Image (tube, rainbow, N blue to C red):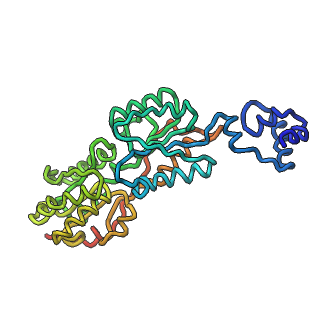
Amino acid sequence: MRQQVAKLAGVSEATVSRVLNGVGPVKEETKQRVLAAAAELGYVPSALAQRFARKKSGNLGVVLPYMAKVSLFSTYYFSEMLGGIGSEAQARGNDLLLLFRETDQPRDYTALFQSQKVDALIILGARDMPLDRQSFEELAREGYPFCVLNQRYGERGEVPPFPTIDADHWSGSREAVRHLIDIGCKQIAFINGPADYSNSTDRRDGYLSIMEQSGLPVQERLMLTGNYSRKSGYELAPHLADLIASGQADAIFAANDRMAIGAMQGLRERGLEAGRDYALCGYDDADAARMACPQLTSVAVPFHEMGRAAAEQLLAGEGEERAAALSSELPVRLIVRESTGQYKPQS
């Protein structure tokens, strides 16, 4: 069929290959003649052949952390990110190659590019750890297209050393705590995640800044740490119950919905109800926030859009501005529901 296209267009088969595979210089007039001949003959080139010609795999690599006994695909954060990445990759004719890594496993990401297994790489679940930094420094040094999602390296407000798409967790945290203060809460317990995630740092800094701005003292006994699991929130319930019962806390702000719901469950077992005995705010606005009873006030994070934007930037074709070397921070918004909207602090 390619021979017939060449004959009809009056060019060589090599020219037909260059036009249909999008490689090599071809005059615009010749290009249009070849395309017209291919259309007339109903010739559609093999997508696989095009990839080989362009030295492209057609794969967008997505790196995920391996966590034993945890289904990542049922976890809101990862499922939303992957949904956004997948929808954009599909729209651009690319496949996803999922790659799992353990926390202490070496990350030879450059080998994926050198072996042409992937054309670009998106990393989820990264932490501010030496192994991660070293691997990203190598990718950046070699000029490979990659992007880190929801993890920033360097100080907030500085230009990050690696391509990053993040959300404005500092502002989201401030908005959540501001809401709790506005409804009359003055002693707000904070459950944060591990410090090697930049979003944990940002949420902590947002909490501290709005408390200071509002003239409310930050008390060490109200600063708690979990690991972003529902179990860790549940295990903090005895301490939180003591704080609420003794009048030392009237609200809880958790750095994600899973910890908030775990704390809510543990406090309910001790006779304390969110929205009645204390105000409770989560973060992420996962599906579980809307299904909880009472429904959970939470900060909505555009995880799907973050994934889509990363894929769009990395898969930008020839002639488009490749924004993979840039970084962006997407806005978040507070969703008020029953866990705070019904609460009336004791005067």
In screen coordinates, is 191 left or right of 141? Answer: left
In screen coordinates, is 108 left or right of 226? Answer: right
Q: What is the quadrant of the C terminus in the image?
A: bottom left
Q: Taking 223 as reference, is 276 above or below it?
A: below
Residue located at (35% from left, 65% from top): 289
Residue located at (81% from left, 37% from top): 16
Residue 195 placed where, x, y %? 27, 43
Residue 64 placed where, x, y %? 43, 45
Is residue 302 visible in the rendered structure shown here? no
Q: Kindly give the residue lying farthest to the top in the view shown.
A: 141
Q: Taking 276 as reference, is 188 above or below it?
A: above
Q: Taking 332 as reference, is 46 above or below it?
A: above
In screen coordinates, is 283 left or right of 39? Answer: left
Question: In front here: 347 or 162?
Answer: 162
Residue located at (55% from left, 43% from top): 60
Residue 271 placed where, x, y %? 16, 72
Q: What is the quadrant of the N terminus in the image?
A: top right
- Tell me the quarter of the picture where residue 159 sits: top left
- Tell me the quarter of the picture where residue 283 sits: bottom left
Q: Kindly give the residue lying farthest to the left in the view shown.
A: 246
Question: In front here: 340 or 144?
Answer: 144
Is residue 238 visible in the rendered structure shown here? yes
Residue 285 placed where, x, y %? 37, 61
Residue located at (16% from left, 60% from top): 240
Q: How many marks?
A: 0
Q: Kindly give the residue lying farthest to the front in the view shown.
A: 69
